[in-house]
């Protein structure tokens, strides 16, 4: 499991870490370390071109089907290259988000040594998408 998932498990502000995966092996591994991996993601929303929206919607729909409350959630996307995020950074970001009435979401970020598909850069304390015309990441 990723370092960022481990940091979320240690967070004082996150109650549940849910892992979204299409792999039974990864699901079992995540459960071993304390994450909720109750829902195996469908193959058609598990491709390199799948959007975050698809699997977040799938997860929330699954919660609804089993009568679980839809959570307020932190989307912790495990990416490459790996990043080391401290749980106090996550907690501080959540507090900042909760105290920012104009914010609709937040993303923890750090400078990267290699390029990845979903790239962002800082612009006046906000992240600007570097992925062309596509805003559907």
Image (cartoon, rainbow, N blue to C red):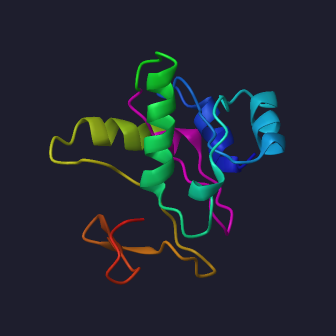
90 in relation to 115, above or below: above
Give the residue displayed 27% in from the left and 35% down from the top.
98
Which of the 4 image quarters holds residue 47? Answer: bottom right
Which of the 4 image quarters holds residue 18? Answer: top right
Q: Quadrant of the C terminus?
A: bottom left
Q: Is residue 78 magenta?
A: yes
Q: Position of residue 5 (x, y in %)?
A: 64, 43
Give the residue displayed 33% in from the left and 70% down from the top.
135
127 in relation to 39, above or below: below
Which of the 4 image quarters holds residue 117? Answer: bottom right
Q: Is residue 110 left or right of residue 120?
A: right
Q: Is residue 41 magenta?
A: no
**Residue 108 visible at all:** no
* Start-end of magenta stretch: 71-90
22 in relation to 12, above or below: below
Chief secondary structure of the magenta span? Answer: loop
Q: Position of residue 78 (x, y in %)?
A: 62, 55
Q: Quadrant of the N terminus?
A: top right
Q: Nearer the viewer, residue 116 or 21?
A: 21
Q: Nearer the viewer, residue 45 or 73?
A: 45
- Badge count: 0
Give the residue displayed 55% in from the left and 31% down from the top.
11
Q: Position of residue 36 (x, y in %)?
A: 65, 28
Q: Is residue 19 left or right of residue 15?
A: right
């Amino acid at each position: 499991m990723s370092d960022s998932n481990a940091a979320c498990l240690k967070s004082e502000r996150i109650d549940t870490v849910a892992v979204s995966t299409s792999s039974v092996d990864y699901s079992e591994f995540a459960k071993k370390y304390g994450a909720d991996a109750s829902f195996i993601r469908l193959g058609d929303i598990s491709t390199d071109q799948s959007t975050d929206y698809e699997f977040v919607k799938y997860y929330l729909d699954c919660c609804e089907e089993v009568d679980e409350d839809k959570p307020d959630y932190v989307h912790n996307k495990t990416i490459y290259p790996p990043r080391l995020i401290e749980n106090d950074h996550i907690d501080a970001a959540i507090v900042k988000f909760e105290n920012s009435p104009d914010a609709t979401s937040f993303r923890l970020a750090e400078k990267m040594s290699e390029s990845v598909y979903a790239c962002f850069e800082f612009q006046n304390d906000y992240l600007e998408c570097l992925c062309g015309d596509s805003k559907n990441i």
